[in-house]
Amino acid sequence: MEFLITGGAFLGAALGRSFKVPILIPACFLIVVMLLVSAGSPNFTFFRTVVKIGVLIISLELGYLVGLISTDLAAARQGFRSLWSRSRTHSGHNSHQARLR
């Protein structure tokens, strides 16, 4: 079960970095199909299958959210770096002109 949760979270993070929200619909559908196919084994009960589907879809969606946030953080960090380098360039230029006066 832990392997499925971790795999769902990593899959969700990869989807979150690359795709928009509608990709979650076919991904969730595939998860449901995979778990229903594996539910044919004798040690699976209906309740256990439903719980696994719910937990796996939640981990997929949380992973997707983490993927979105990591993409936004990378973009924000890049914007902050360019802003920081511009402000250092301009402040260094102004202090140099102040020394020349």
Image (cartoon, rainbow, N blue to C red):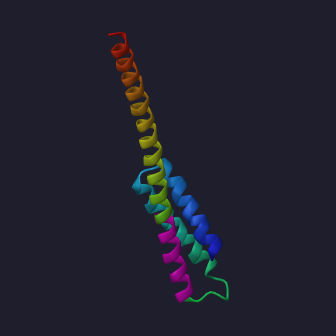
Residue at image x 41%, y 36%? 79
Q: Is residue 35 above or below residue 82?
A: below
From the image, give the main secondary structure of the stretch colored magenta: helix
* Residue 59 on the magenta span: yes
* Residue 76 on the magenta span: no
Q: Position of residue 101 (x, y in %)?
A: 32, 10
Residue at the far top in the pictured view: 100
Magenta residues (range): 47-61
Q: Total of numbered circles in the picture?
A: 0
Q: Nearer the viewer, residue 78 or 47?
A: 78
Q: Is residue 36 above or below residue 25?
A: below
Q: Is residue 86 above or below residue 20?
A: above
In the displayed structure image, the side of residue 3 where residue 19 appears, left or right? left
Residue at image x 46%, y 64%? 61
Q: Quadrant of the N terminus?
A: bottom right
In the displayed structure image, the side of residue 31 where residue 69 appears, left or right? left
